[in-house]
Amino acid sequence: MSDRGLLSRLSAGRRSVDQVASIAAHLRELLNARQGHSETVPSFGIVDFNDVVHTLPDGLRALQASIRAAIVEHEPRLQGVNVRMVESTNPLTVCFEITGRLAEDRRSVVRVHTELRAGGLFVVD
């Protein structure tokens, strides 16, 4: 039997859901920012897709590495971050799956699906 009461266990689960939603919102901001555009934190964001599109398919690996590096540096709530490209049903989009563990609770895995759409906008689910 747990030494924590029902309400504290329920509220802890709610915090986890809120934290995942907060991480997803932050990833949306991070992936839609471009490195060098923030004067206070020049490393915030990822490489511009327009800069790597001319080197496809190697450019996609560079974009994948940039996404991972940005998350490792700017999202401390995720540990053990892995970014992999996944198939897209739309030939005009590029999709990535981001996985990691919550820093507070290493047992909780966070999995986020991202889609880079025409125009360079990332959608994060």
Image (cartoon, rainbow, N blue to C red):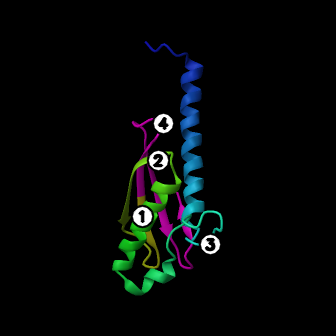
Q: Quadrant of the N terminus?
A: top left
- Point 46% across, 15% down: residue: 2
Q: Nearer the viewer, mark 3 or mark 2?
A: 3
Q: Which residue is mark 2?
A: 78
Q: CA distance from mark 1 to mark 4?
A: 24 Å
Q: CA distance from mark 1 to mark 2?
A: 16 Å
Q: Is residue 98 left or right of residue 40?
A: left
Q: Which residue is mark 4?
A: 104
Chain-order first, disc 1 or disc 3: 3
Q: Depth check: 61 or 120 in front?
A: 61
- Magenta-highlighted residues: 98-125
Amino acid residing under circle 2 = Leu
SS class of the residue under badge 1? strand
SS class of the residue under badge 4? loop
Image location (x, y in percent) of residue 79: 42, 46
Chain-order first, disc 2 or disc 4: 2
